[in-house]
Amino acid sequence: MAEENTAKSERVQCFGRKKTAVAVALVRTGTGQARINGCPLHTVKPDILRVKVYEPLLLLGKERCGKVDIRLRVKGGGFTSQVYALRQAIAKGIVAYYQKYIDEASKKEIKDILMAYDRSLIVADPRRCEPKKFGGRSARSRFQKSYR
């Protein structure tokens, strides 16, 4: 009985960020299901960006991702930022799961595959929107100077 409980509670929580969008991934031992805010992965809109969410899963293949269930929650930002936050959360979650419950060698292998494809799958983009200042219409541009 105790063995079953420990097997079921094998889970890690990871987040992904892009601009103001934050996605949280709960990766646990399972059958390879992935859900975003309770909906299946294939319902992601817009359709063009759906492939971006699938990227970490497609790169790692069925043999690595088939052993884990991924539950995702996403908030904030626009739809593009949310998609990029989701893919980062998925990638970081799988890496963390492999580090904690499987072994360091397979974790390193997975991380290298993801980093070789796209660094933003593991490392967050630090760029943020710069606040507007006075004396102009945006953060950097100034109003035109006139002498007369």
Image (spheres, rainbow, N blue to C red):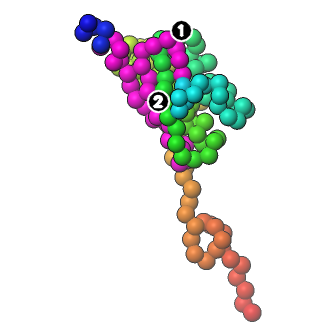
Classify 10 Å Cα crowding around label 2: few (below 14), some (14-19), many (20 and above): many
Mark 2 and mark 1: span between their CA atoms? 20 Å
Q: Is residue 14 visible?
A: yes
Q: Is residue 121 visible?
A: no
Amino acid on which the number 2 mark rests in the picture: Ala
Residue plotted at (29% across, 13% down): 6
The answer to which image quadrant residue 85 occupies is top right
Residue plotted at (49% across, 23% down): 70
Which residue appears farthest toward the left when viewing the image? 2
Question: Do tag 2 and tag 1 residues touch (Cβ < 8 Å)?
Answer: no
* Numbered disc 2: secondary structure: strand
What residue span does the magenta drawing correspond to? 6-34
Of 38 and 54, the residue lying toward us: 38
Instruction: State the image coordinates of residue 86 (x, y, percent, origin top left).
Output: 55, 33
Is 31 placed above or below 137 here? above
Is 34 placed above or below 19 here? above
Of 37 and 106, the residue lying toward us: 37
* Numbered disc 1: secondary structure: helix
Residue plotted at (73% across, 86% down): 146
Instruction: State the image coordinates of residue 8 (x, y, percent, origin top left).
Output: 35, 14
Residue at which label 1 appears:
63
The answer to which image quadrant residue 113 occupies is top right
Side of 43 where 63 appears, left or right? left
Residue at which label 2 appears:
25
Q: Quadrant of the N terminus?
A: top left
Of 124 and 5, the residue lying toward us: 5
N-terminal-most mark, 2 or 1: 2
Which residue appears farthest toward the bottom when viewing the image? 148
Side of 136 where 86 appears, left or right? left
